[in-house]
């Protein structure tokens, strides 16, 4: 991917509109009208040989005829006519082109050829392309509206700290409009279309480099290079610029057709979420959440932690918030003695001065304004409190105005985040809303949304605190892999465990008996009880066909078990190649988990972790990370499971060796990364996590190579 300086695109000296029109419904007419209506100060160059002028602006016969400085060409022509115009742009030194129209790869084989030719022509001429099949872009500050459709129509965007890339014109701009109506201001907006050339990830990096951008928004339906996205996200985190992503297309399963449990546990959205966690991305789930998060981030009041306070006159709103706070891992922290003293002196006795504060609905009057301000000051000054939510609920008119004025006064003495819950109709609260807007205070429409926004601010604060670890490249060892079998093959349990053991993963003590070998006695160095398993690259789930026998207690049982698993394997899978029978030590004190790897086409090797054995696909308690990663990330994976408490010991069970498990996860991630050109998937199930200090042992494994 070529690196571009986007300053001339977002701040063009001139914009050509190729395919300019006098018909208002035509894209070229809409671009021209928007530039003139909104006061763009650069050169405006309509191009259409049919007209001497359009909208009182000189019209050029071709791009070649433009003699003044021009940096962007907006092309509103049929697909077959675009490449020659791109060639002209290259000759004139126009570095960027916005191709509005469709008819490219979305239209079948002929469109694919047109798009390929378009890209080759652009590269030959040194032209970068937005689109095709897009709404274009906007720089709100300088009124450069290089697009058409909804982004050129009211409501007009106001300047502000957010730059956005949207991969859907209609829905994506609906998101932008809702944010604008909530008071969010924008710097740059790009509807990226087909992303034939300039990708969303490159635009994210450009926004990071833009000094006027403080917050980045991306509406994504997918990326073409997952590692490039992670690099861009880490670049944003390193700069302290929050990246908010609304990811669509999450219900498409995208399951890999493979033999392991891991493939059944993994879908594309799991992998995106793993990438978000590893790079400090703020994920939103719908338009409302996205707008809330942008409002709260735009205040410039950084979150500090998860200790929050709320106050209001509605007990029900406080209960609703408290429920949501639990889901967002927020703590309604008790106030300090000094804070409680101020609250008791200023709030009515029939309410509650504990967190959450109930100051009762009738308390909010002109006469009590000073007392309300003192209460807010005290809460914000409490060192144990990181954020404050004011639950105004249905307050309107004068009472909401008093609340807004009190918040505005309290904010002058604190830089902690404060947000408001209000369900009041706008026409009944205009004065209060204007006061809050002037102070850049977010007004959210439910207590749950207040809690969610607080959680996001806390999450991002935590990401900044861990920024050094999150943006660092994991130091992969210089160890070389052992020689692998050639071609697309499946490594059976014995071969897979030998590979794992050679890389530092603890495995069970095993002995391989070739088929036909009599098992008269236990192999040297092993003790009963043992497990007996068929070994075959063609049989992924041995238990399902009776090809595993556990707790073999003596020589007689051993001989019988060997005969039985061979017979069952041949009956269930007559065409399977049998490598032998594996006699393995039994680990009776281990908790079963699974570690798996899939090689995603966008992100490369991804590690999955969850409960193992027969529960792997049933409980769906699984977490994911992009390989490679270190011990701290591995510990995060363990703690994210709903069953994480089991590792600490419950109901008399011992605490598990989390240190050894985390090391195993990290080691597997490193192995997967080193094998990235060959690995298709890996399934280590179960990994037996023994009591603390006694290790974690891989009892079974399957590796599929490509």
Image (cartoon, helix red, strand yellow):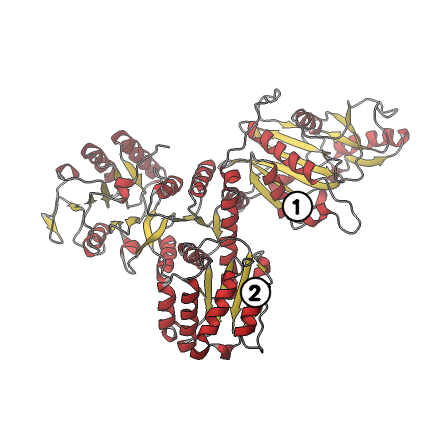
Residue count near mark 1 (Cα–Cα under 10 Å), binned few <14, some 14–19, many ≥20: some
The quarter of the picture where residue 428 lies is bottom left
Which label's residue is closer to the chain start, 2 or 1? 2
The correct choice, above or below, for 437 with respect to 627 in the image is below
Residue count near mark 2 (Cα–Cα under 10 Å), binned few <14, some 14–19, many ≥20: few
Say which of 698 and 161 sits in front.
Answer: 161
Name the residue furthest top: 483
Q: Residue at x 15, y 36 (%)?
A: 64
The correct choice, above or below, for 77 with respect to 562 in the image is below
Relative side of 350 to 432, left or right: right
Nearer the observer: mark 2 or 1; the answer is: 2
Q: Quadrant of the C terminus?
A: top right
The quarter of the picture where residue 580 lies is top right
Q: Residue at x 51, y 53 (%)?
A: 304
Which mark, by number, is residue 572?
Answer: none
Name the residue carrying label 2.
Answer: 338
Give how far across and how far down residue 170 sits, in percent.
36, 54
Q: Quadrant of the N terminus?
A: top left
Task: Decide if residue 383 is in sight here.
Answer: yes
Give how far across and how far down residue 467 sits, in percent.
50, 42
Give how far across and how far down residue 300 sits, in percent.
41, 54
Relative side of 498 to 474, left or right: right
**In terms of secondary structure, where does tag 2 sit?**
helix
């Amino acid at each position: 991917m070529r690196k571009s300086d986007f300053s001339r695109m977002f701040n063009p000296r001139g914009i050509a509109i190729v395919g300019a029109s006098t018909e208002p419904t035509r894209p070229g007419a809409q671009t021209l009208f928007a530039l003139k209506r909104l006061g763009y100060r650069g050169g405006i160059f309509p191009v259409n040989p049919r007209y001497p002028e359009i909208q009182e602006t000189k019209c050029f016969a071709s791009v070649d005829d433009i003699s003044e400085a021009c940096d962007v060409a907006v092309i509103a022509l049929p697909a077959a006519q675009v490449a020659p115009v791109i060639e002209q742009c290259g000759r004139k030194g126009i570095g960027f082109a916005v191709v509005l129209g469709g008819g490219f790869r979305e239209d079948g084989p002929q469109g694919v050829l047109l798009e390929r030719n378009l890209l080759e022509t652009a590269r030959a001429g040194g032209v970068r392309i937005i689109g095709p099949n897009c709404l274009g872009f906007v720089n709100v500050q300088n009124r450069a509206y290089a697009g058409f459709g909804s982004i050129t129509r009211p409501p007009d965007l106001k300047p502000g700290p957010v730059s956005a890339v949207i991969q859907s014109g209609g829905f994506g701009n609906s998101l932008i409009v809702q944010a604008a109506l909530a008071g969010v201001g924008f710097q740059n907006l790009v509807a990226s279309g087909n992303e034939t050339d300039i990708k969303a990830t490159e635009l994210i990096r450009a926004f990071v480099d833009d000094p006027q951008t403080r917050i980045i928004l991306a509406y994504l339906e997918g990326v073409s290079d997952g590692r490039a996205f992670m690099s861009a996200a880490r670049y944003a985190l390193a700069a302290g610029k929050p990246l908010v992503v609304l990811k669509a297309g999450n219900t498409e399963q995208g399951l890999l057709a493979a033999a392991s449990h891991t493939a059944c546990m993994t879908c594309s959205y799991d992998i995106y979420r793993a990438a978000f966690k590893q790079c400090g991305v703020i994920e939103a789930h719908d338009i409302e959440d996205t707008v809330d998060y942008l409002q709260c981030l735009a205040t410039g009041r950084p979150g500090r932690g998860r200790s929050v306070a709320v106050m209001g006159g509605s007990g029900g709103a406080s209960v609703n918030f408290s429920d949501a706070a639990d889901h967002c891992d927020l703590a309604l922290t008790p106030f300090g003695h000094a804070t409680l003293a101020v609250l008791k002196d200023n709030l009515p006795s029939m309410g509650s001065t504990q967190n959450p504060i109930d100051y009762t609905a009738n308390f909010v009057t002109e006469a009590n304004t000073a007392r309300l301000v003192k209460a807010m000051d005290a809460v914000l000054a409490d060192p144990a409190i990181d954020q404050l939510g004011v639950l105004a609920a249905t307050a309107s008119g004068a009472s909401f105005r008093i609340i807004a004025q009190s918040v505005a006064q309290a904010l002058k003495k604190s830089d902690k985040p404060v947000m408001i819950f209000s369900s009041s109709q706008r026409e009944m609260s205009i004065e209060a809303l204007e006061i809050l807007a002037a102070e850049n205070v977010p007004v959210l429409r439910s207590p749950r949304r207040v809690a969610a926004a607080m959680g996001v601010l806390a999450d991002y604060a935590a990401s900044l605190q861990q920024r050094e670890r999150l943006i660092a490249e994991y130091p992969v060892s210089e160890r070389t892999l052992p020689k692998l079998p050639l071609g697309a093959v499946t490594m059976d349990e014995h071969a897979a465990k030998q590979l794992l053991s050679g890389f530092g993963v603890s495995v069970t003590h095993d002995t391989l008996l070739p088929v036909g070998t009599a098992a008269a006695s236990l192999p040297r160095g092993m003790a009963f009880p043992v497990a007996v398993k068929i070994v075959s690259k063609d049989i992924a789930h041995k238990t399902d066909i009776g090809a595993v026998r556990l707790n073999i207690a003596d020589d007689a049982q051993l001989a019988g078990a060997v005969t039985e698993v061979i017979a069952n394997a041949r009956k269930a899978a007559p065409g399977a190649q049998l490598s032998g029978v594996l006699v393995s030590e039994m680990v009776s004190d281990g908790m079963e988990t699974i570690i798996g790897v899939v090689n995603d086409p966008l992100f490369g090797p991804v590690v999955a972790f969850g409960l193992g054995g027969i529960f792997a696909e049933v409980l769906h308690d699984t977490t994911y990370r992009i390989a490679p990663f270190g011990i701290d990330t591995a510990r995060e994976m363990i703690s994210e499971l709903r069953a994480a408490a089991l590792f600490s010991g419950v109901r008399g069970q011992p605490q598990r060796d989390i240190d050894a498990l985390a090391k195993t996860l990290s080691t597997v991630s490193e192995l997967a990364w080193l094998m990235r050109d060959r690995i298709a998937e890996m399934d280590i199930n179960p990994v037996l996590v023994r009591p603390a200090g006694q290790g974690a042992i891989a009892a079974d494994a399957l590796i599929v190579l490509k």
